[in-house]
Image: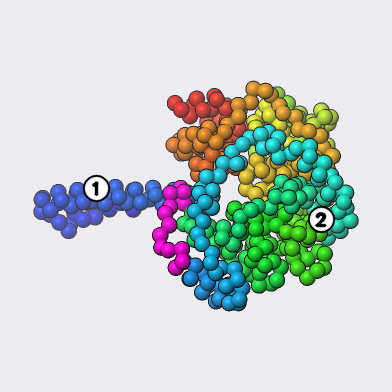
Amino acid sequence: MPVTLTRLSKIQSNPLQRSVLTMSLKILNRVSAIIVLILALPTSAWAQGCKNTGSFSAWMKAFKQEARAAGISGKTINQALNGISFDPKIVKRDRRQSFFSQSFLQLSGRMISQHRLNNGANKIKKYGSIFRKVEQKYGVPAPVIAAFWALESDFGVNMGNDKSIRSLATLAYDCRRPELFRPELMAVLKIIERGDLRASEMIGSWAGELGQTQFLPSHYYNHAVDFDGDGRRNLLKSPADVIASTGAFLQHLGWKANQPWLQEVRVPAKLPWKEADLRIQHPRSQWAQWGVRTASGGKLKADGLPASLLLPMGRTGPAFLAYDNFQIYLQWNQSLIYATTAAYLATRYDGAGRVRKGSKDIVVFGYKEIKELQRRLERKGYDVGGVDGKMGVKTRASVKEAQLKYGLPPDSYPTPALMSRLRQ
């Protein structure tokens, strides 16, 4: 709360002193306002510009003490952490992610090749008995698990080439997100201590995920399953463990058995577009009443199953009904484009056809365009969740609010018309 002269009027009556005091109070109030503004910035704004202080070796020494206090043996600590050095390349990569700045059609077009579709179908057939047992136990069908398996590592072909412990130690020390990666580094030690993997085996993605479906170490430790009965939870080499662990984790996230996740649909030229929002659900009967039809143009099943209308590229692009299970995809990965691609691939494995691309006139917003959009929205007072060049849930929500304000169709996807209004 600002300091006012009224509160100090009785303290000082000398004109010169009052003049000096007035100037001091103005400076104080201005500094206070700046502090409030800084504190109001999103965490990402702080994190992107943070700088590391203190030596990595001193930090590692303190972390080893913390690990010992947590019950990790000296043998495991030495095996995993002795000789680990800081990797600046990992920090650079963490702060310059732009992979998920692609549009849905761009990402799905790149990630869902015919080879990957064929390979997934073959894996589902080859491990059919395991998939059936996993679905019986965890309620997650084979196409859903196979889609994550495909996208995360091409069924184990590409699990990453970085030393996971070095990556995690670097990210746990780095100032950007230490609260996220410090527990993951501790989880790696617990995995080794339990005997599932050796430190030397831990080769994975640059961010420290492990295994054929790229589990964070804490997820690995808490949810990995020894489904082949060899006494180890090995998500690098055992297909049975990979399939079962992925099913177990999805069940933990809240997967609803015998329920759909995503369904491609066709939308009419006119629709209350503000209802097209993942935060809004209506019964399928309501979507059918508004003219939404199946991908083939047939009548939509008019029942009470709740669903959201997802338009990843706006009202003239691909359209989907997203059911409750779609939220599990967003828990797996918060990128809406990744989640939509993974869910769509699962529908392909389940027998759905290729998605309709929609209008050729859709303007695709790339990394630079999305960042400009986010900056201009922020200047107008919208919360986009940070200027990161990704069309995330918060950015889409802000786009919708701006579209409503400017009288544009509120389908949550930016257009040149919206950018023109924001630039004014």
Q: Element at badge 2?
A: loop
Q: Taking 116 as reference, is 274 above or below it?
A: above
- Residue 407 in view in this figure: no
Q: Amino acid at mark 1?
A: Lys
Q: Element at badge 1?
A: helix
- Residue nearest the viewer, comparing 351 with 61: 61
* 21 left or right of 363 in image: left
Place of residue 280 in the rendered image (x, y in percent of width and height, measured from the top left):
66, 41
Select label 1 or label 2 by which is in front.
Answer: 2
Q: CA distance from mark 1 to mark 2?
A: 64 Å
User: Which labelled disc corresponds to residue 26?
Assistant: 1
Place of residue 21 in the rendered image (x, y in percent of width and height, measured from the top left):
18, 52
| Identity of the residue drawn at 81% across and 28% down | 297
The residue that label 2 is drawn on is 139
Label 2 Cα crowd, 10 Å radius (few <14 / some 14-19 / many 20+): some
| Identity of the residue drawn at 61% across and 76% down | 75
Place of residue 85 in the rendered image (x, y in percent of width and height, measured from the top left):
51, 62
Label 1 Cα crowd, 10 Å radius (few <14 / some 14-19 / many 20+): some
| Identity of the residue drawn at 46% across and 57% down | 175
Labelled pair 1, 2 in contact (Cβ < 8 Å)? no
Place of residue 340 in the rendered image (x, y in percent of width and height, measured from the top left):
69, 41
Q: Amino acid at mark 2?
A: Gly
| Displayed quadrant of residue 113 | top right
| Magenta part of the chain | 45-58
Query: Which mark sits nearer the N-terminus, 1 or 2?
Result: 1
| Identity of the residue drawn at 65% across and 56% down | 204
